[in-house]
Each structure stands twice: as C-alpha cells, then as structure tokens.
Image (cartoon, coloured by chain):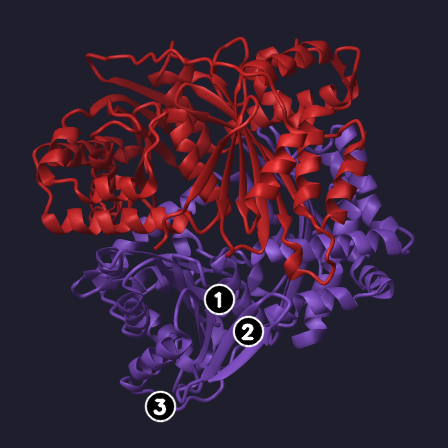
Chain colours: A red, B purple
Amino acid sequence: MGVISEAVKEMNGYKLHIVKSDKFKTNTIVWKMKAPLNKEGVTKRALLPHVLQSSTAAYPTTEKLRSYLDDLYGANLFVDVAKKGEYQILSFSIEIANEKFLSDPTPLLSKGLELLADILLNPLAQNGSFDSETVENEKRTLKQRIQSVYDDKMRYSSHRLVEEMCAGEPYALHVNGELDDVDNITAQDLYSYYQQAFAQDELDLYVIGDVAEAEVEAAVASLFDFAPRTPLEANLLSGIRKEEKVVKEPQDVKQGKLNIGFRTNVKYGDKDYYALQVFNGIYGGFSHSKLFHHVREKNSLAYYVASRLESHKGLMMVMSGIEFENFQLAVDIIKEQMEAMKSGDFSEEEIQQTKAVIENQMLETLDTARGIVEVIYHNVVSKAHVPLDQWMQSMQQTTKEDIIAVANKVNLDTIYFLTGMEAGK
Amino acid sequence: MEKIAFEQLQEELYYEKLGNGLDVYILPKKGFNKTYATFTTKYGSIDNHFKPFGKEEYVKVPDGIAHFLEHKLFEKEDGDVFQQFSRQGASANAFTSFTRTAYLFSSTSQVEQNLETLMDFVQEPYFTEKTVEKEKGIIGQEITMYDDNPDWRLYFGAIENMYKEHPVRIDIAGTIESISHITKDMLYECYETFYHPSNMLLFVVGPVDPNEVMKQIKENQSKKEYTDKPEIQRRFESEIEEVAQKKQVLEMNVQTSKCLVGIKAPSGEMSGKEMLKWELSVNLMLDILFGKSSRHYSELYSEGLIDDSFSYDYTQEQGFGFAMVGGDTPDAGKLAENLTAMLLAAKTGTNFTEENLGRATKKKIGNFLRAINSPEYIANQFTRYAFNEMDLFDVVPMLESIKLDDIRQAASSLIDEKRFTVCQVVPKK
C-alpha cells in the first residue's frame, strides 16, 4: 500500500516524471530548475520566477493572464524559490481541475501544459529584455518579501541562526536574495540570467494525476525542447567549529526565540541517513519526542519546541519560544537530552513509536500531489535514487546501535537567542 | 445508516444520528493512505456566557477557557494522549475556533485503535489542580507567541474594532491574566455543558469500510452512559449594527506596515441554504473586486500599495460575520483610503458583469475540486457547515445558481460606511 510508481523519461534537456494516481480531483504540473546557490546569482534567481508568472507574450498583463487562469476553472499557478542544501531551486506549479468531475468536458490538462510552456518560454520580452515595468514591479515586491522576514520573529530567528552558523558558506545566503542587490538588476540583466538558467540548470518536469502517460509524453515533447547539458555541481562547504558559538540579539519582543543549530554530518542518501531520521524523531521531531516532553510538558517552558532536519546540507535545527529568563534552563535541558541520545538513554518503545510515526508521515505526504513531488525530488537533489519502499525498509531496519552511532556524529554548532531589550543588556 | 451519493464528484457520504444524539459521517476515499478523523463540539471561544448543565443560573467564564480545556483533555492519569497516538503510528492534534473545538488524528495504519483512542480521550476528562496550573505556563507562552505576531494582532485588532459586545472580540486563547483564574471545577462545568454527544459531530474520511467504522463507533458509544440533555442555553448581549471603533493603529517592532479594512456583517439570524447563498455571494463579490484578475488588484499592485501578502476573506457564523481585505503595504493610510473607496463604489453594483461573475464562479468551482483533494478540508469544513445547518456538498450547485442580482444584493446589504473599520500595524517610532 501507499508506495507510488514514478515513470521517469529522459527528454531533450530535461527529465519528465509521471506519477499516475486516480485519487485526486485535479492534475498537478510542476517544473523544477536547480542551480548552485551563489552570491552573484541568488537575487536574480529569486526575482526571475515572479517576473515570468506576471505575464506572457500572449497575455501581456497580470489581469489578462489571471483571467485566463480563472477561465480554466481557477487553475492555480504559483511559483516558489527554495534552498535545498547548497542549491537554489525554482518551482513553477499549475494545479488544474480534472474535467471528469465537471459538467463542462473541455480537456484542461493540455491547456495547463501549454500555458506552462508559454510562461516559461514565451515571456513578455523583446530585444533581449523583459518588459521593464513588470521587472520594476517585481523588484519592489521582492524587496518587501526580503524585508518581511524581519517582521515574523520565528522566521527571522531561524534565518539569523543560519546566517551566523553558516557564515562564509553559500547556504548562509537568503533564499530570496540580498536586499542591496535588487536595485541594480535591470530588465536586460534578468533576461540574460533567464537565458543562462535555461541553458545550464538541471530541469525536471512532474505531472501527477489521472493521466495517460503516452499522451502526456507526446504533448510535453512537442512543447519543451532544450539542448543537453551537464548540470553544475555545488561546492559543498561545511564549517567545523571547535567551540560552540553563542549569539544573543536584543530586540523589542515579548517572547524569546531560541534557535540552536547542529551539524549532523549526514546527508540524504547516506547509509546512516535513516538512523538520523529516527534519531531526530526520538529527540525532537514529534509531540512524543524528548524535547516536547522535557521542555514543554515537564517544565512548562514553551508552547512549541521541535527539531527539524535539513537533509541535503546536513543540519538539524532546534527551535523554541521561551521567556527571556529561561534561556539557560532551556539550553541546559536541550543539551541534556542530546547527551541522553548520545549515550543511548532511550527505550525500544521510543524507537518503535518513532518509526511508526515516520512511516505514517511519509505515507501521508504521498496523499497530496505536491507532497509526492517534494518526496521524489529529493532523488534529483541528492542523486541518490532511493525508491520509496527501500527508504521505508531501511528506516524500519535501523537499530538502537545505529541511532547511538549517528547521534555521536551530531555536533552542536551555534546557539542563537532573540531576546528582549532589557534582558539583552 | 443513510448513504448520500454525489455523482459529479464521484463521492459517497454515509450518515447516522446515534441514540445519544451524536452525528456520525463517514466519507470513504479510495486510493488514499491516510484516514483522518475529527471529533468536534459546537463549543468555542464565544460560548462564555451560559447556563451550566443542571444549574438554573447563567454564568460567565474566564476568557480562553474553551481553548484551555482543549489543551487539558490531552492529559490523563497515565500520561498524555500524544504518546498513545504515536505508539499507534498516528499524529494527533486539536484546535479551538470562535465556534468549535475539534480533536483529530490522522494515520495510515491501526485506524481502528486510533479511532477508539480519539473517542475515549475526548469523552473521559481528567482535570486536576496540579495539571491545570502546569498548563498555565505553556498556554502563557502560546499567548506571548501571538503577541509578537503582527498578522495575528492585525486580524484580531480588526475584529475587536467591529464588535462592541459580542465575545468574538475576545482572543481565543484569552490573556495571561484571564487564564490565571481558571480552575479544574470550571473546566468540568464547561465540559459537562458542551461535550454531550448531542452537541458533537464525528467525521471519518479515508480508505475505510463505512459499515465497519459505523459499527465500531456505535459499539464504543453504547458502552458510555449519557442522560438526555436539554438544549444548551447560551446568552449573547445584543450587538450594535455599526462598528464599535472606526480605526486602530498598533505600533510594533516591524519594518513593513500592514493594513486591513474590515466590514462588519449585518446582524440577523441566518442558517442553512440562505446562509450558504449569502456567504458564497459575498465571496464571489470579493473575488470579482479584488481577485488577481481584477482591475483593482492590478491598480493597487502597480501603484506599489500591495504585494503578494494581499488577501481577502469573508467569515459568516451565527451571530457574527465579517469581511477582511488587505495585507502588507508601504503606505497603510493610502491603502485604507483606496480600499474603502473601491468598496464604496462597488455598492452601486456597476462593477459586476455577467462576464466577471461567470469567471469567478468557474474559479470557485475549480477551487472547490482542489479543496476536496484534502481529507482535512472535507472533515473540518463539513463540520463547520453542518453546525450552521449547511451542506458542504451543496457548494457547487449553489455556486451555479447564483445570479448577478444576488451579487448586487450582497453588495448593497454589506457595503455601508458605518460597517467599515480599519486596523493598521505600523513600525514603532
């Protein structure tokens, strides 16, 4: 039950992935573009998808493009910029109704694919430049998007931890780019970057839904055609810190935000990656985990406390919201529980419980089309190509010794605390 | 057990009202891994003035008690229920809204045990003074977390502006001060009043056999003793038609300003199809006025007054309702002015054409299909609709029946300057 079948086809310049499933009322199309994160490209790359989704040559204003999407039964178009390991990944998604659930039989999937091709390949541009008004509008919105991180203190403190912890590594770059670089981008620069991205990026197209494989393949082949390429590899840089770094930042806030970063030294696809998943689950991933139990339930210090893995970079982040004066107490408990993990102070029951919940979480993720894409895209980023049933099996076979061993590879790197003005003095 | 088929959507819904009054709905979803179940009581933050079960006098309870009770139901004599769910491979959660408290789990295995755990933990309260005190620290941090969240403050600030008396103006979690007064006896009193099965609804959606699930639920419920219960007596002060406050500006530690224009819904009791039609008409109206394909959206966007945080939404419940339009903006004053002018101009109805209604209707139908991919959406929304005597599966036929006149009617009853309010968050000087 549950494990999906993914058909992968080598196309001209990209891979087509089809996952057939009849459980959804919609079909989902996702176009992914992957390139290494770097200071020169990060801001242009963050801007590009927002410019592309604003208009096309055929629908030259947002009003016209969005009206067309509404006419296609509210086809949902959205773009996303994400950081996975040392890569910056762009996603263009269209989710469109499957007409078999409508009284109107107009075929919608082919229209969705055509529109995606239009957005990607026929933008509103001429003479080697995007429409400058569109670019200016999107530059302004991008600046607001970058600034808005400051206003959401949970996101802000997560972001600040990464900045402090990974200083000097590409991973420290903000996914939406650098505020100071936005103004200098011209409509011509961005167009050159666009051409470069389509020439060099690793490209993947996902189609999920109740679709006919051969038909999709034929339609896609006629719409998307690129020169072959060898995708660029990111330079993996990973700092080793001898002594933990502690950063306290005073701000006008009511609640302290404690974010602690660890280096796991394990990445997606590594042999001990499955043990790392179980380790994280016992330690802080869930509401039965040690952190939730000790920080929240036993000591009433927090409402939220959790740990989360960044699988491609090899990081684990702990986050919690606490009273300013409880900083040391919370840090001590979080460290104590880490020591407990390293010395094997956890039961067979905790292991079984955690495995059950991880398996459940994975299967639940596969109940959404976007979840399916995210799960199988790990294989592209890591080049590991782990089939899902094997993933599940390896996770289930993890032993207590494996978990202790992986716990001992995990090192605390940086403690970041967003604290109050008075407390920070 | 009754079976209701929705042919166009290819879904089947099973329903039965049990002897103790509990409404049970089951929607089989083939091909899905997960089963999702919600056990919901029609009891939320607004139910703070009522006649306790078995008593003659009305009481007023501290702000935030429904939410507090939700937290405390998870703790039992032998530990917390999260542990048990995770031993059974499930993830569990709960939420409290203005009008409902819902307990839920999702799991891809051991569904029968998890369903049993869900019914039992909600129906077997265990409150002690000690555990109640302990929870005050945890919920205190939840409240503080929201205090630092400008979007949360903005939204609830706008509601506070609109309502003078109605308890919808009170924060769902209460304040650190208000929850300090909560005792275990108050929790039991609220529990006895609002957690009777006749005030609750159980929804199960997933790859399940409806006959077996119904049988299990009936067996579980028949083992528990419930006396028949009179209708719950809630009291709400009468509310004025106009907003309580025209404007509120919150200074916070932010870099970007935020602005919401709120519209308070006309008073008057509404439920069932009438309410569904009204709610959908107002939503279509807002889509036509402010959707990404609208002229207004393009104008505001190209003037730099809005960005992709811009949103609009309409909420209608029995006794209160409001529209909210806005988001992040570099100029909160100008955005408020423009939105207000656009809304007032729409009252005459000239903005609405057959063409833009047709488009908005298609969009809503497509969005509905997308939404019912989600078991969570189905269970939660179905419950909300049912508590208001509406049927989630009437949405598409109702959308198809809404005419231009209905939109104009909605605009003319809702849009009225006395119903408008503005809430802004601006950077602290």
- The chain holding disc 2 is B
Judging by the rendered image, the residue that carries numbered circle 1 is B100
> Where does the C terminus of chain A fall, quadrant-wise?
top left
Whole-percent x, y for residue A208 in the image: 53, 44
Residue at 48 percent across and 66 percent down: it is B100
Q: Is residue A336 visible?
A: yes
Q: Height in image: B240 above or below A392? A: below
Instruction: Check if mark 2 and mark 1 are on a common chain.
Output: yes
Mark 2 touches mark 3? (CB < 8 Å): no
In three-dimensional space, the C-alpha distance between marks 2 and 3, rounded to whole angstroms, equals 22 Å
Camera sees residue B327: no
Which of the 4 image quadrants contains residue B297?
A: top right
**Which image quadrant for residue A41?**
top right
Q: From the image, which quarter does the N terminus of chain A lie in? A: bottom left
| Vertical position of residue A131 compared to residue A102: above or below | above
Query: Which SS class for mark 1?
Result: loop
Q: Residue at x 34, y 87 (%)?
A: B226
Check the residue under mark 3 and report the chain it is in. Answer: B
Closer-to-camera residue (A215/B211): A215
The three-letter code of the residue at mark 2 reads Phe
Name the residue: 78% across, 43% down.
Answer: A67
A86 vs A326, nearest the viewer: A86
The answer to which of A232 and A290 lies nearer the viewer is A232
Q: Which residue is mark 2?
A: B387
Q: Earlier in the sequence, mark 3 or mark 1?
A: 1
Q: Which residue is mark 3?
A: B227
Q: Secondary structure at mark 3?
A: loop
